[in-house]
Amino acid sequence: MKNLKILLALLCAITISSCASLKPVSVSRQNPITGYRYAYITPTSGLTSSNSGVYGNAYGLYGSSQTKSVNPSDIISGSLIKYGFTIVPEITSEIAEKTIIVNYGESGRRNVFWGYTIEITLQILDANNHEVICTSTAEGMGSTEADDIRIAINRALEGIFTSND
């Protein structure tokens, strides 16, 4: 009985420790982002993901599914608008010195007890000289890959605009 309690406690500890606490957001800042008013977001393609489950009772089996879509550039655009940026469809010489370019990339996955997290990296460049202003890397984990990406993007942008580096 004592061995069973120890085993149960150990299993609980492993489960809790692997409950995918997301890694902290990593922001590397080379220059301040203040002074920029416009943003050009490099176009990205959309992703559609789904999950499903089957459950049952004495009367039969039932199923449910959930499908979600995400386009990273749309999420980035919406967030930057909230931070006061004007999203531009192209970079012109008149606004280049006040414009940032935002690049998005999926940079990894990490296995956790019941699934995985998706890691993304945002790179922000000065549109005038293409020098890196900052990069931000963050993980996300939700019920679908679309949720993972949305969460990671929001965390990465929040890290950029709230960090005091």
Image: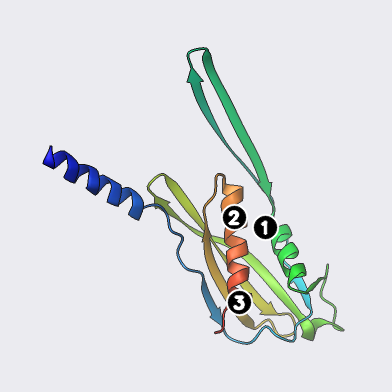
Residue at 79 percent across and 80 percent down: it is 37
Distance between the alpha carbons at the discs numbered 2 and 1: 7 Å
Q: Earlier in the sequence, mark 3 or mark 1?
A: 1
Residue 28 visible, this orientation: yes
Q: Earlier in the sequence, mark 2 or mark 1?
A: 1
Q: Say which of 3 and 138 sits in front.
A: 3
The amino acid marked with disc number 2 is Ile
Residue at 67 percent across and 57 percent down: it is 72
Q: Residue furthest left?
A: 2
Distance between the alpha carbons at the discs numbered 2 and 3: 20 Å
Q: Residue 131: x percent and y percent? A: 65, 83
- Assign a secondary structure to mark 2: helix
The reply, left or right, for residue 122 in relation to residue 80 is: left
The reply, left or right, for residue 94 in relation to residue 114 is: right
Q: Which mark is residue 149?
A: 2
Q: Residue 45: x percent and y percent? A: 69, 53
Please tell me in which quadrant of the rendered image residue 78 appears. bottom right
- Assign a secondary structure to mark 1: helix
Mark 1 = which residue? 72
In contact (CB < 8 Å): disc 2 and disc 1: yes
Residue at 62 percent across and 63 percent down: it is 154
The amino acid marked with disc number 3 is Thr
Can you say whether 27 is above or below 152 in the image? below
